[in-house]
Image (spheres, rainbow, N blue to C red):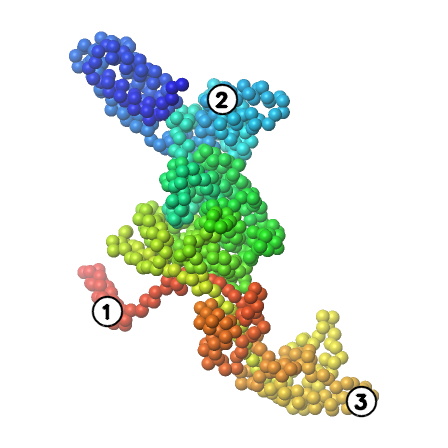
Amino acid sequence: MARKLSAQDAFDEVMDLVGTLAQPSTDDQETEAVKRLEALSQDLAELGASVRAQEIVAEIAAFRGMQPSWKTNGKHNFAVYVKEMLPSLREALALAKTNTADVIWRTAEILRGAFREPEYRRVILPFTVLRRLDCLLQPTKAAVLAKHKEISAKGYDLRMFLTPITGVQFWNHSAFTIKGLLEAPDDLRDNIEDLINGFSPNVRRIFEKFSFMATVDKLREKGRLFHVVQAFSRVPMDMYSVSSHDMGKAFEELLRKFNDASPAGEQYTPRDAIHLMVDILFDGDDDALSVAGAIRTMYDQTAGTGGMLSEAEEKVRQLNPNAKLRLFGQELEDETYAICMADMLIRGQDPADIAVGDTLESDKHPDERFDYQLSNPPYGVEWKPAQEAVEREHAKGAAGRFGPGLPRISDGQMLFQLNAISKMRPFINGEGGGRIGLVHNGSPLFTGDAGSGESEIRRYILEHDYLDAIVALPTDMFYNTNIATYLWFMSNRKPAERKDKVLLIDATNMGVLMKKNLGKKRFELSDDCQRRIVEAYHEFSAFDWKDQAPIGGRVRQLKAKVLPTSHFFYRKVTIERPLRLRYELTAERKQAWVASLTNKKGSTPIEAQNLLALADRLIERLGEKTYLSTEAVLTDLKAMDATFVCEEKAAGRPLKATAFKGKILDALRKGFGVRDKKAEIVNDDKGNPMSDSDLRDSEYIPFSFVAKHSNDVAAGVDAYFGAEVKPHWPDAWVNTGVVDESDGQIGVVGCEINFNREFYVYEAPRSREAIKHEIEAMEKRFMEMLKGVAG
C-alpha cells in the first residue's frame, strides 16, 4: 500500500506542479500536471491547507480545463496566469505549514465573546485530544466496529480483543468520527456523547475529568458547537501528518500559550527552571542513556499537567532517539490530571501510569521504584487532610514512607522529600539507584530546631548521604511567588568523589530581566545561564564567577561551595544558670501564695493553713521584711512555727510542726520569692543549685568543633563550654541530662542548611566623607533646580 503523503510533502508537491505550469510546456505536460493537481486538491483540506489555498488550486485546474486555448493568447496565456497566482498560493500554503499548535490555537477565534479567555483551554485541550485519538484510530475503525459487533453481546473483555487491532492501549467502538459528526448538526451534542462513550475506560476517564460534556453543553448553548467541531475536523493530526513526538510538543506549546495568557498559568513551573532541573538530573548519565535500547523510568509525585515529565522525555530523546523513558505520575486536581493523562496518551505513553489522588494520603504506585524523579510540591500547604494516613505511615518507622519525622502540620513540603526517597530504585552491588530533583522554598533548609520533625528529616537525608546538591535560584522566577526558591538534588548512587559531600550553588544573580512580566515572573534563566549552572554542578568544585558583560544592566554572578555533610550538623546543648531569689513577706505576696496553695476544689490544706498563719505572724512581728536567701527566711519561719505549735497546744489544739521541704518549700518560693541577681543561689532538698528557667539558654555546637576533640562529644562540649560560656557566666553549667534520643550523647543533634550564611559577603559601610560629598552634590543640584524654577 502506498504511503500517505504528509502535509509538508503534499504542499511541496503542489508548489512544484504549479511551478511547472507557470513555465511554457506541452499540452501533455500541462494535462499530466493538472491531473495530479486535481488529485492532490482532494486532500488539501484534510491536510490542513487554508480555504484560500484550496480555492487557488481549484481555480488553476478549472481555468486549464475551461480555456485550453489560453496557451497561445499572448501574455494572457495559461503559464502567465499561473505565474501571477504563485505568490498568493505560496502565502496561503505557508499558513498551513505553521506548527500544529498554532493551527489549533487559531480555533480560539471561534470562542471569542462566548467564553472568557481563561476558559479557552477547557474547550481546546479536550477537543485536541479527541481529534488526535480520532485520527489515530481511523485506519482501524472499520475492523474495530466489526469485531465489537461480533463480541459485544458475549460479555468478553473488550481490551483483549480490540487493543490488538488498534495497536495502542485504547479503542473506540462508536460509529461516529469527528468528520462524521458534522453530517447530523441537529444531533451533534448527543452524537458527541456517543463518540465519547465509545472510547475505552482509560480515555473516557480523561474526558470525565475534563468535565467535557458540560463544556459541550455550553458550546451548544452559545451557538459555537458546530463551528468548533468543524474547525477541529480540518486539523490534520494523523501519524502521517504529525508524529507522536511532534504532537507532544504541540500539546506542550498549547499549554504554554494558555499559561502565558491566563492567570491560571501561575500554578505551573516555568520552562527555564524545568530545563535546568532536567539537565542537572541527567548530568553524568549521558553514556548510560545513550546505550541502544536503554529503558528508564521517571516519576513526578505532583505531576500537574505533566510538564516535567514531558521535558525529561524530550531530553532523553535528544540523547538517544532509541531510548525509552517510561513516565509515571500522580496528581490531585482533576483538570490538571486530565491534561497530564492526555499529554501522556498523545506522546504514546501508557495513561494507566498517571494516577489521580493525594500522594501524601495514598501512594498510587506502591510497588514501583524509579530511576529518576522530578517534582514541584506545593509550598506552605497544610497536610491536615492526609494527617491520619501520614501518621500511620510514620508509625511504621523505617517500613513507612514518613518514618524519619513529621514536619509541622502547616507545611508538607518535607513529606514529599521523604516520599521521593522512598520511591528511589534501590542501589544494589553497584547497579540501579535513583536520582531526585525537587523545587522548594527556603523553609526545608532551616525551619525547625534540633529534635523537630523538620530537623530530623534533614538529619535522615544527610546521614544517609542522599543530598547531592542545592541550587539557589533568582527571586521572581516563578509565576505565583517572588520568594526565594531552591532546587534540591538527591541520589542514593552518588559517585565516589561526591560521597559525604554536598554542593551548594548560588545562582541568585543569574536571572535575566524579561521584556514582559508573566504574573510575578520577572526573571528567566537564559540558555547561557543554564549552561553555566549545569557546568558548575558537573565540575563539583568551589568557584566564584562574575560576568564581564552584564545583560540588561544586571551583573550575573555564580558561586559554588563543596562542603562535607557534617558541616550542617550541630548539637543543641542546654545551659543552666542558678536560681537566685529574694523573699518579700508582704500582704500582696501572701495572696499569691494562697492561690498557689489552693486546690482545684477551692479549699486550702490544713498544713498550708498553718503555714499561712505563720506568714501572718511573721509579717506582724517583723514587718514587711526582705530576705536575700532561702535559709534566712526558713530560719525565722521555723522559729515562729515552734512557737505557734506551743501556743496551739496551750489552747488545746495540738498541731505538728510544718515540714519545710518538698511542695511546701516550693510553694514558699513561688509565693514569696522574687528573682534577684544579687540574692543567694537557691538549692534543692539535696543541696544542689536549682536552675532558673528564665535564664536557661542553649548553645549550638558545630560537629566540626567536636571533631577537633577526636569526636568525643563530652570532651568537645566541655571545651566549648569552657571557651564560649564560662568566661561570661561563671556560675553556669551544662545540663547533661538533656541528650539526643538516637545516640544518647549530651545535647540534641540538629541539622540546618543556612544558604545565606554560606555565601554572605561583608560589605563595609561607606565612609563619612563619601556620604558627605554625595549630600553636598545633591544639595547643589537641588539649588540649581530651584534657581531654574525662580527664573
Name the side, left or right, on which 128 lies relative to 685. Answer: left
**Type of residue at label 3?**
Lys
Nearer to us in this view, 671 or 38: 38
Nearer to us in this view, 688 or 668: 688
Q: Which mark is residue 28?
A: none
Whether residue 779 is visible, yes or no, is no
**Which picture quadrant has residue 16?**
top left
For marks 2 and 1, the one nearer the N-term is: 2
Q: How far apart are marks 2 and 1 (CA)?
A: 84 Å
Read off the residue under disc 1. Answer: 773
User: At 52% across and 43% down in the image, what residue appears?
Assistant: 330
Q: Distance between the residues labelled 2 and 3?
A: 112 Å
Read off the residue under disc 2. Answer: 141
Percent position (x, y) of residue 538? Answer: 36, 52
Outermost residue toward the left in this view: 74
Q: Residues within 10 Å of mark 1 (few under 14, many from 20)?
A: few
Read off the residue under disc 3. Answer: 649
For marks 3 and 1, the one nearer the N-term is: 3
Q: Of the residues tagged 3 and 1, which is closer to the observer? A: 3
**Tag 3 and tag 1, C-beta contact below 8 Å:** no
**Type of residue at label 2?**
Lys
Q: Of the residues tagged 2 and 3, which is closer to the observer? A: 2
User: At 27% across and 55% down in the image, what residue appears?
Assistant: 547
Q: Residues within 10 Å of mark 3 (few under 14, many from 20)?
A: few
Name the side, left or right, on which 721 lies relative to 44. Answer: right
User: At 49% across and 50% down in the image, what residue appears?
Assistant: 429
**Type of residue at label 1?**
His
